[in-house]
Amino acid sequence: MELTDAAARAISERIEQLKVEHRDLDEVINRLMADAAHDELQMRRLKRRKLLLKDQIALLERQLNPDIPA
């Protein structure tokens, strides 16, 4: 099933939004790690959210460029 141009654009926009959030989380995590008194629970939650975003990005990218079986 092929995507319409509008659907492909919507997916691309969503990917960009998720990438921005992923980068922002990376910055927050790096700042927290620099603080010796950072909250480990908060750090784990942020890292888990970052991994979830990465998975969502990969899923959406596969929708835009599906693997064609050989």
Image: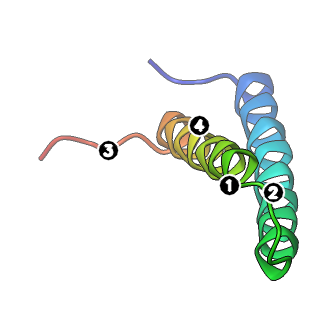
Q: Along the line of sight, which residue is nearer the eye, 12 or 50?
A: 50
Q: Residues within 10 Å of mark 4 (few under 14, many from 20)?
A: some
Q: Residues within 10 Å of mark 2 (few under 14, many from 20)?
A: some
Residue at point 27%, 42% (across, down): 68
Marks 3/2: CA–CA distance:
29 Å
Residue at point 77%, 55% (across, down): 39
Marks 1/2: CA–CA distance:
15 Å
Q: Earlier in the sequence, mark 4 or mark 2?
A: 2
| Image side of residue 7 versus residue 2, left or right | right
Eye-nearest disc, 4 or 1 = 1
Residue 37: % across, % down = 83, 69
Q: How many marks?
A: 4
Q: Residue furthest top?
A: 1
Eye-nearest disc, 4 or 2 = 2
Q: Amino acid at mark 4?
A: Gln
Q: Give the residue pinned by disc 3.
A: 67
Q: Give the residue pinned by disc 4.
A: 56
Q: Give the residue pinned by disc 2.
A: 25
Q: Along the line of sight, which residue is nearer the eye, 49 or 14?
A: 49
Marks 3/1: CA–CA distance:
39 Å
Q: Earlier in the sequence, mark 3 or mark 2?
A: 2
Occupied quadrant, residue 29: bottom right
Residue 18: % across, % down = 77, 44
